[in-house]
Image (cartoon, rainbow, N blue to C red):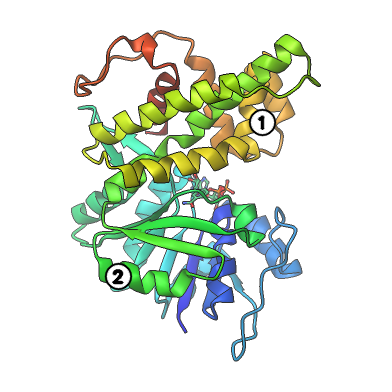
Amino acid sequence: MATITIIGSGMMGSALAFPARENGNTVRLVGTHLDREIIDACRATNRHPKFAKHFPKGVPPFPEGCEFYQIEQMDEAVKGADLVIGGVSSFGVDWFGEEVLPRIPVEIPVLSVTKGLLDQDDGTLLCYPQVWEARLAAKGIKRDICAIGGPCTSYELVAHDQTEVAFCGKDLNVLRKIKAMMATDYYHISLSTDVVGIESAVALKNGYALGIALTIGLNQKAFGLDSELHFNSQAAVFGQASKEMSRLLDLQGAGTLDNLCVGVGDLYVTVYGGRTRLVGILLGRGLNIDEAKEELKGVRREEAHRIRQAQRSRLPAPPAHGRDPHRKEAGEHPVGVVHVRTLRDDA
Ligand SMILES: NC(=O)c1ccc[n+]([C@@H]2O[C@H](COP(=O)([O-])OP(=O)(O)OC[C@H]3O[C@@H](n4cnc5c(N)ncnc54)[C@H](O)[C@@H]3O)[C@@H](O)[C@H]2O)c1
């Protein structure tokens, strides 16, 4: 079997250790410099502090569990690996590009879970594999980066809920090898060579989901915290979000039904997922940023960051890129305004 090294022991990176190890692969989980306590806890308990379930043992004849590494041991953890998975959030994109990728031998494929797009001065939106590939090329390193998109929450993957995601990359043969390492009877993987399409489809779903959850909070504000859950307003924003996803994909030159479905599926799971939904509901109830942050202690920074962006969306809309043939009045895209600002701040 293969050796899979996961760098970034946040929730998603750690969750991927489950299918990886249950497939009989050797799994090395490496914490970033921000994950020291997580790795200490994993070593002490064989469990990620945010998961109820222990890391899996392997399957015979490889019964041992996962191996845990602090960041200083990264080279040791990467040595002899058949696959490196990048598990950082968008805050770690620069660090991953500067401190990690240049140290990974080019013959080892890299698969990233990080979601987001980086906007350029000319309005172009680059997905993270493109950003990293360009930065590596500037150092004289040529490598392709694969990525994961699609509906998958970490805790449900850990729970073995039936999950369908898309792995994307330029080389189908490399993707097939990665799929063989990672696919299980509960982790189903489609393959796509449309990296920009898959990455663009899923990049903005957190902001859209936040917008949908806002309507829940608005209803609670209007009718009481224990009022019946309403769906008309959620569905209205869901429809608007789907339309905007489609337009973004067109803008990226990747407007296919397959790509859109990956994004819409991811949006659906995120609306029902824990943290983004909670942020949206709190804002909808009328909490200000400080009150929401107080309620959200323990929620990861990426979400808290989006609260701030959502609040700023009350400001006038940012200038149009001038390349979207569908764009009309800025006010016609209330959810999109949140996103454009999120993208800019991520930069
Ligand atoms: N592709 C998928 O199927 C999928 C599913 C869920 C989430 N995600 C994405 O995966 C990413 C991680 O999500 P998560 O739920 O694991 O988040 P998390 O907050 O649990 O973990 C974040 C990880 O990024 C690292 N990190 C954060 N800031 C950093 C910095 N400045 N420098 C270096 N490292 C830094 C942390 O140390 C940690 O390892 C997000 O971008 C999320 O949107 C992908």
Outermost bottom residue: 61
In the rendered structure, the answer to whether residue 232 lies left or right of residue 249 reads: right
Mark closer to the chain start, 1 or 2: 2
The quadrant where residue 41 appears: bottom right
**Does the rendering let one see residue 196?**
yes
Q: Nearer the viewer, residue 272 or 97?
A: 272
Q: Residue at 70% x, 56% y: name it.
A: 51
Residue 164 versus residue 318 in the image, above or below: below
Question: What's the residue type where badge 1 is placed?
Answer: Leu
Q: Position of residue 259 (x, y in %)?
A: 34, 45
Q: Residue at 31% x, 9% y: name it.
A: 329
User: Residue 278 has which mark?
Assistant: 1
Q: Position of residue 84 (x, y in %)?
A: 42, 67
Residue 89 versus residue 23 in the image, above or below: above
Question: Disc 2 beta carbon < 8 A from ligand 1?
Answer: no
**Does the rendering let one see residue 35?**
no
Question: Disc 1 beta carbon < 8 A from ligand 1?
Answer: no
The residue tagged 2 is 174
Mark 1 element type:
helix
Q: Which image quadrant: the C terminus?
A: top left
Q: Residues within 10 Å of mark 2 (few under 14, many from 20)?
A: some
